[in-house]
Amino acid sequence: MQTISETVKPEQVLESLWKKSRFASYFYQGVDLIPDSSIPTLALIIYLSRLSLFYNPEFIEKLSDDELTGLLVHEMLHIVLNHDHRGNRDGDTYLQNLAQDMIINSYIRDNRKTFFSKKSQYLHDVPELILPEGIPVIPEDFFSETYNYDPVWEEVYIWLKKLPQEEIKKLRFNPPPGNGSGLSIQSRSAIDDLADALNSLDLSYNKAPMEKYTRIKNMDGLMFESSSGDPVPTGVHIMNRKTDLNVAESKLNHFMNFARKDEFCRDERIFMEVTSLINAPQKTDLTWQEKLKSIVDITAQSNEWEYTSRKFNRRYMSQGIYSPGRAFKDREAITVVVDVSGSMVMRPGDIESAFGIIEALLKKFRVYLLCIDETIFVPEKLGDLFVKSSRNGKPYEYKKGDWRYIKTGSSGTTYFSSLFNSYMDNHSELLIVITDGYIYDMDKLKKYRNTLWLISENRDEKFSPPFGRSIKISTAKPERRLRQSGGEA
């Protein structure tokens, strides 16, 4: 039987939540609150065909009202984003659930000052959304290596999965701007504790350690522990049955119908985001980095084995059978040309952003670098600059960090005829041209269809490429939004 002390705090928090977010309140009006000391923290699950929040009374008493509010929003977003805690088939359940938590916590961290905002109330007198210290967010290493600032959980999981276990232990979270304002991360924080928890896990076997499971109402749940054995202050991930996921989706649609009828709720930012998410669940707007990677994947080939008639299969020659043999196809080339003319207007940040993506290709491709002003030339290093080389043969093979030696706006006007009308003859590789798009002899260029124009962020006018495709560079990080899963990991 429930005692008054076990239910007072959750009821008080839900009452205050009504004033902060009608949307979140409508959600929890359809949730049963059930104290249960057998669960280490809390969990939002389908139980007896109802959404039920099981919580440990001792655990929530250790939290402030604001921290409990943050955890309630966290659990709600798992339902909104349709997170299946069972994870994808043949995947590492532990890391998949970790990635799901990282996605939600990072969204809350980045939107903590505006989560409760309304259409006419954005930054003024908006309560801040707080999460307890020490919970997992997306590591900064993920953003610096992938240039993906708006990932779904599968993308974070794939990145985590590729890391050796010892590398996971080295990950660190950077605290958000403004020390002490929401999700403050201390020097010894969640990633250290989670790394310790991974000590018993051989990542190659795709299994979560059994000691990380707990059971509630005959269901398995996955939890995160600190090195001391205490639960990390986040929810337990219950392995719901597939039919339970259908029930959860039905409950979500039900309370959304109530929320739509409330004009105060309709003005909330979170309601607008979730409505947009439900109406258009598929990702349609790619970042310029994702567009670049997609084009490279389509138009350029990486290391691979191929069957070729130029090299016959000797195994069958004794039988008089001629069969194509297998040969290793070496790294294909990509040619990158940078406009360094006097008319070129490009900030160092544009160059760095562009080559950040190009450097991610170095393991799969040879990247040859050329520069162009009034004519095409091969660069060579002189001190801390690239200058014109006296040789006219093979172009310079780009190495990581070489973008620092590129200086634009050096001399002359941009003429591209030497590149397209002569140099690219007998070439077929992907050509990436980094320019501001102000090209003097545009109408005289010979078409090279396999061209990708990377246009400076500083250019205000629309750029219409004479052939090939164009992408405008953007150094601004997109605001993290709510996005549903992107598919199988």
Image (cartoon, rainbow, N blue to C red):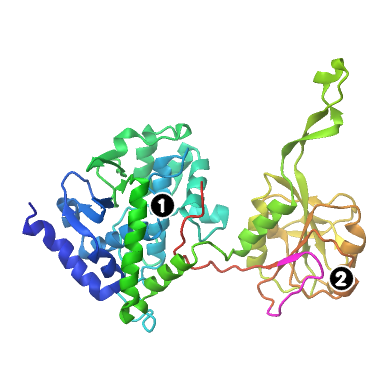
- Mark 2 — residue? 415
Identify which residue, 63 or 446, lies in the foreground. Answer: 446
Q: Is residue 203 left or right of residue 467?
A: left
Mark 2 crowdedness (10 Å alpha carbons): few <14, some 14-19, many ≥20: many
In magenta, the rendered stretch is 460-470
Question: Is residue 211 shown above or below 468?
Answer: above
Mark 1 crowdedness (10 Å alpha carbons): few <14, some 14-19, many ≥20: many
Q: For residue 64, which quarter of the picture?
A: bottom left
| 207 falls in the magenta region | no
Whole-number angstrom distance, CA of label 2 to CA of label 1: 50 Å
Report the amino acid beneath label 2.
Tyr
Q: Position of residue 243 (x, y in %)?
A: 35, 49
Element assignment for label 1: helix
- Mark 1 — residue? 100
Question: Is residue 384 shown above or below 364?
Answer: below
Q: For residue 447, which quarter of the picture?
A: bottom right
Q: Is residue 253 left or right of residue 390?
A: left
Q: Which residue is rendered at x = 34% and y = 81% of the image?
A: 124
Q: Is residue 384 left or right of residue 77?
A: right
Element assignment for label 2: loop
